[in-house]
Image: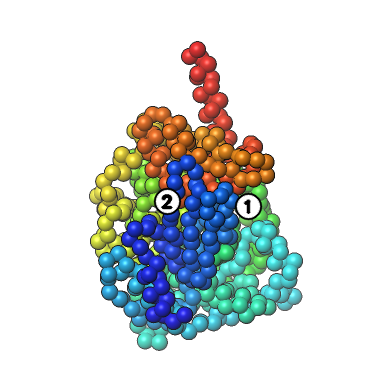
């Protein structure tokens, strides 16, 4: 299909009468079909323009088949991201601007942008400058691949991304200069996909673009991003940027670890060890990463010890401990509550619950990635189902013009390119901010029921100022989890099963009509129209009746037991 026909097909799919979700991270357009009262009898269709693959759900019955990507999104809230990068042109500046045509203007420009990406030449990954010790093969055999697939490896690979001068001599291009382990023995199709992913990694390691100047001082920073394939498989990118060794002015370089494991704190400590060894010699990184790769990833609450030799220091033992609450191990609420007050966080939460467009602004990449993951975690047990990009590369800034829900992190130097938008929430996380809400709709304070808002604030106030880490995560997550327990925790009673072995059907109308008081019912009636609630219920409908597992269900049972005791005391 040529570029013109692709663009025409995309524009024809856009209808002003249908609410849509444009997932720029995968160039995926999802059509939302409003479900009728009484049950989710009509399912939403989905068309993926990156592969022209369609996945439809059956109408008017309780059975629906979810694609791998949809199942992944229900669990992670992340949309496919690595597919936005195919073959990035050597000259990022040559991107057609297009013309605005109402709300469809961004689609035209982005359609042209993806086409320009495809025209670029594939950059081959440079061979590692380091020589691996004799006897250690870089190519992995089937057993080692299976071991990684089972989630036992800490990471898939480590890459070093360096800024190299472009042909014009005035700009820099990010290029991978080192990769461990080398991915040899791959089939052609696998290698092509791997090259696309590696190109995406360079883009997210240096989202600022190509305009860099050599530096003599640079404070290292750590941040993360997510790459999600169209089949739903997820890889996390952990990045540490620092100034390489040497004299005189020089551009920074980035160390990036790609892993299926989501544990930001753990990988931050790993980067501390990598950086310490980098200051001695690049050759010191390999044996440490090899030891780490051979180690078993610890179970929640457990510790693994890595032995590593450093000249003049001898053998060191590095202890890596995994948090006990594994569903929060990729989250640190300290940054979020360090940038915003409790009341301000509540307003952001209210906008996220109704799946609105939210942009976070900050100077530091680490602040953006930590805050956006923290906001998504506040939605537990529900997951964000729309566009989710913790750090938007400058070359993809047009994503802010999408008319559909998103959570985006944008560097403050690009603020002028987002403030001309309306019908969204723009949150400034900078230390020198006067008002954190640069742009807002104005009704964020009235979305949540007043009584439940007050209860969340009281619960948050119980934390100590000095509390941090797992204790802070526990207090914050508990406060927002109780909100969902009290508003929609009775959902299981309204999933009806006709006969054994078949899926259930959720009685939406009876569910929200049973809610008291009226102000809470009004909120829930809006919330159950969101995609995050829809997919949550679809997963429940596919399960067999019986006791549910997980912390959310545990809190529901505790709350129901408490209400029974209170009712007994009154009588």
Q: Which mark is residue 100?
A: none
Residue where numbered disc 2 is placed: 34
Q: Residue 285 location in percent, x, y?
A: 60, 68
**In the image, is 435 to the left or to the right of 83?**
left
Whether 317 is drawn above or below 512: the answer is below
Q: Residue 301 location in percent, x, y?
A: 63, 45
Farthest top residue in view: 571
Q: Residue 84 location in percent, x, y?
A: 46, 70
Q: Secondary structure at mark 1?
A: strand
**In the image, is 64 to the left or to the right of 44?**
right
Q: Residue 456 location in percent, x, y?
A: 41, 35
Q: Which of the pair 157/395 is nearer the observer? A: 395
The reply to whether discs 1 and 2 touch (Cβ–Cβ < 8 Å) is: no
Residue drawn at the location 31% of the way across and 39% of the way down = 446
Q: Secondary structure at mark 2?
A: loop
Residue drawn at the location 53% of the way across and 68% of the way down = 53
Residue where numbered disc 1 is placed: 319
Residue drawn at the location 27% of the way across and 70% of the way down = 100
Give the crowd class for mark 1: few <14, some 14-19, many >=20 residues within 10 Å: some
Lower sequence index among marks 1 and 2: 2
Which quadrant holds residue 548? Answer: top right
Whether 382 is drawn above or below 180: the answer is above
Q: Is residue 330 visible?
A: no
Q: What kind of colouring is applied to the model shown?
A: rainbow
Whether 420 is drawn above or below 75: the answer is below
């Amino acid at each position: 299909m040529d570029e013109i026909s692709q663009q025409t097909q995309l524009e024809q799919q856009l209808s002003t009468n249908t609410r849509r979700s444009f997932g720029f991270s995968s160039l995926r357009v999802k059509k939302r079909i409003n479900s009728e009262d009484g049950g989710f009898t009509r399912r939403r269709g989905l068309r993926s323009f990156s592969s022209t693959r369609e996945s439809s759900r059956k109408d008017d019955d309780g059975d629906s088949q979810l694609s791998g990507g949809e199942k992944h999104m229900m669990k992670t809230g992340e949309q496919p991201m690595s597919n936005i990068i195919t073959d990035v042109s050597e000259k990022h500046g040559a991107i057609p601007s297009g013309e605005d045509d109402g709300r469809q203007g961004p689609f035209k420009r982005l359609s042209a942008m993806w086409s320009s990406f495809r025209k670029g030449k594939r950059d081959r990954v440079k061979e590692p400058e380091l020589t691996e010790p004799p006897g250690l093969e870089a190519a992995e055999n089937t057993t080692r691949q299976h071991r990684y697939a089972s989630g036992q490896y800490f990471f898939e690979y480590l890459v070093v991304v360096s800024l190299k001068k472009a042909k014009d001599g005035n700009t820099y291009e990010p290029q991978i200069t080192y990769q461990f382990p080398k991915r040899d023995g791959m089939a052609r199709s696998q290698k092509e996909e791997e090259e696309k992913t590696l190109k995406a990694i360079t883009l997210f390691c240096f989202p600022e673009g190509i305009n860099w100047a050599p530096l003599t001082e640079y404070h290292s920073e750590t941040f993360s991003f997510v790459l999600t394939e169209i089949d739903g498989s997820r890889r996390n990118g952990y990045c540490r940027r620092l100034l390489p060794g040497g004299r005189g002015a020089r551009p920074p370089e980035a160390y990036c670890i790609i892993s299926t494991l989501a544990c930001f704190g753990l990988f931050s400590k790993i980067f501390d060890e990598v950086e310490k060894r980098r200051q001695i010699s690049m050759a010191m990184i390999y044996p440490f990463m090899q030891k780490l790769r051979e180690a078993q990833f610890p179970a929640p609450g457990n510790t693994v010890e890595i032995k590593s030799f450093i000249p003049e220091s001898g053998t060191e033992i590095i202890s890596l401990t995994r948090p006990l609450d594994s569903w929060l191990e990729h989250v640190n609420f300290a940054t979020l509550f360090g940038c915003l007050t409790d009341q301000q966080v509540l307003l952001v939460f209210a906008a996220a619950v109704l799946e609105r467009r939210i942009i976070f602004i900050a100077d530091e990449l680490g602040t953006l990635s930590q805050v956006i993951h923290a906001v998504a975690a506040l939605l537990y047990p529900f997951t964000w189902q729309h566009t989710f990009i913790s750090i938007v590369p400058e070359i993809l800034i047009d994503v802010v013009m999408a008319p559909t829900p998103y959570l985006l992190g944008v560097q403050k130097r690009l603020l002028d390119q987002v403030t001309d938008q309306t019908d969204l929430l723009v949150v400034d996380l900078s230390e020198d901010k006067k008002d954190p809400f640069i742009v807002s709709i104005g009704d964020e304070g009235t979305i949540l029921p007043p009584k439940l808002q007050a209860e969340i604030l009281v619960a948050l106030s119980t934390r100590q100022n000095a509390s941090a880490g797992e204790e802070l995560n526990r207090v914050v997550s508990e406060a927002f989890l109780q909100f969902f327990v009290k508003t929609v925790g009775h959902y299981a009673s309204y999933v009806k099963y006709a006969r054994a072995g078949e899926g259930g059907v959720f009685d939406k109308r009876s569910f929200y009509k049973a809610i008291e008081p009226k102000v809470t019912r009004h909120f829930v009636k809006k919330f159950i129209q969101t995609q995050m609630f829809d997919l949550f219920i679809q997963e429940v409908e596919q399960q067999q009746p019986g006791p549910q597992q997980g912390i959310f269900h545990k809190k529901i049972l505790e709350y129901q037991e408490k209400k029974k005791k209170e009712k007994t005391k009154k009588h």
